[in-house]
Amino acid sequence: MAKQVFGTSHVPLSPAVRAGDFVFISGQTPVGPGGENVGGTIEQQTRQVLDNVKAALALAGCELSDVVKTTCWLEDARDFPGFNKVYATYFASEPPARTTAESRLMADIKVEIEAIAYKPLAG
């Protein structure tokens, strides 16, 4: 099966790509519905990022419960407790495998998250 691309972006990436039974979600940032970066606390930005991950998953017919792995980047490791508190509400049971690292991000944001989901194709 060839890959399937879902969604569009103003930068050269696809929000979601299916390859067989796996769906890869590009790194999501705290961009609100109007295309603006959402400022505020790590908790506010993490909520927006995870809402964006959820929306990108939906493009490919997936849900947060289908996520098997996330990679998360925090601009400041001291934000980890606040990030983790919000993250836990989105993955309350059977959370995916996760890597979290401190990194300088590409924009003035506090967090970015990418995800891999597993959802077998019907048939």
Image (spheres, helix red, strand yellow):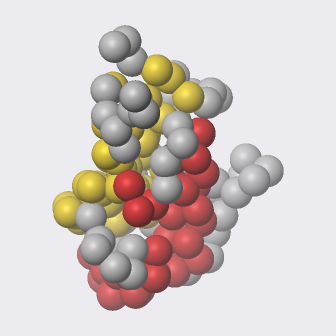
Residue 101 falls left or right of residue 21: left
The quarter holding residue 78 reads bottom left
Note whether 21 is above or below 70 in the view shown.
Answer: above
Q: Residue furthest top?
A: 2
Q: Residue furthest front?
A: 123
Note whether 83 is above or below 18 in the view shown.
Answer: below
Which sits in the foreground, 15 or 95? 95
In the rendered image, residue 46, in percent from the top left (x then y), is placed at 50, 70
Q: Residue furthest right?
A: 34
Which sits in the foreground, 97 or 109? 97
> Residue sitting at 34 percent across and 65 percent down?
74
> Residue sitting at 75 percent across and 53 percent down?
33
| Numbered label tally | 0
Which sits in the foreground, 71 or 92? 92
- Residue 49 visible to an observer of this rendering: no
> Residue sitting at 52 percent across and 37 percent down?
60
In the rendered image, residue 116, in percent from the top left (x then y), is placed at 32, 46
> Residue sitting at 61 percent across and 30 percent down?
7
In the rendered image, residue 90, in percent from the top left (x then y), is placed at 46, 74
Note whether 15 is above or below 73 in the view shown.
Answer: above
The quarter holding residue 31 reads bottom right
Q: Quadrant of the C terminus?
A: top left
Residue 97 falls left or right of residue 25: left
Note whether 60 is above or below 39 in the view shown.
Answer: above
Which sits in the foreground, 102 or 2? 2
- Residue 28 visible to an observer of this rendering: yes
Residue 47 falls left or right of residue 64: right
Q: Quadrant of the N terminus?
A: top left
